[in-house]
Structure formats: structure tokens, C-alpha cells
Amino acid sequence: MQKQVLNYRVIIEPEKMGKKTVYNAYCPSLGVADYGDSVEQVLKSIKDGIRLAIECLIEEKKKVPKDNLEDQLITSVSVTTNKIATAL
């Protein structure tokens, strides 16, 4: 059986839950999300979820989306405003 390595972008954000911090992970290309108590734990968990999503797509004979990470620029920007943000 031939193996193929697929790379996917995963976004991880911390979230406060009372005194505890959990980490939410999301893979936009596959719509897979998960959470864990640490970055390492959530990476392991979402990797399993991504593998399962890919295997299900293959079994259903559906196209497996690919992330072209080489073509993407992922960055952040800082924006200054004179208005006070009430949502913060």
C-alpha cells in the first residue's frame, strides 16, 4: 500500500474556561475542529481527526481537499482605531 503525506493548515487558539485554559484547533480545508488541555494534546487529537476525515472522504469516493501551503501567506495585522471596541 502506497502512503502519501498531506499537509494541512491548523489554527490553534487558547480559550479560558474558568481558571483553566484549553486549546481549540481548526483545520479550515477539511472543517475539522477539536480541543485539548495543551497544544501538544490538541495537535495529536486534530491529526487523528484529519486522518479520519480523509479516510471517510476516500471511502465515499469524494475528492480530498489539499492545502497548498507553499502558495499561502499566513500573517497578522495590527489595526488602530479611534473608536472604542465594545465587544472586547
Image (tube, rainbow, N blue to C red):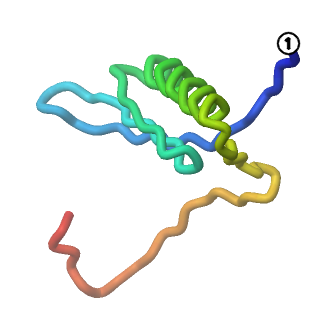
Q: Amino acid at mark 1?
A: Met
Q: Secondary structure at mark 1?
A: loop
Mark 1 nearby-residue class (10 Å; few <14, some 14–19, many ≥20): few
Position of the C terminus, as image quadrant, is bottom left
Query: Could you tell me which residue is drawn at 15 percent across and 73 percent down?
Result: 86
Q: Residue furthest bottom?
A: 82
Q: Left or right: 86 with respect to 38? A: left
**What percent of the width, then of the height, locates residue 15?**
28, 38
Q: Left or right: 77 with respect to 55? A: left
Q: Left or right: 28 with respect to 38? A: right
Q: Left or right: 71 with respect to 20? A: right
- How many numbered tags mark residues here? 1
On screen, 81 above or below 2?
below
Query: Could you tell me which residue is drawn at 37 percent across and 36 percent down?
Result: 24
**What percent of the width, then of the height, locates residue 46?**
50, 27
Query: Could you tell me which residue is drawn at 69 percent across and 46 percent down?
Result: 63
Q: Which residue is mark 1?
A: 1
On screen, 2 above or below 22?
above
**What percent of the width, then of the height, locates residue 48?**
53, 20
Position of the N terminus, as image quadrant, is top right
User: Between residues 61 and 85, which one lies in front from this camera angle?
Assistant: 61
On screen, 74 above or below 11?
below
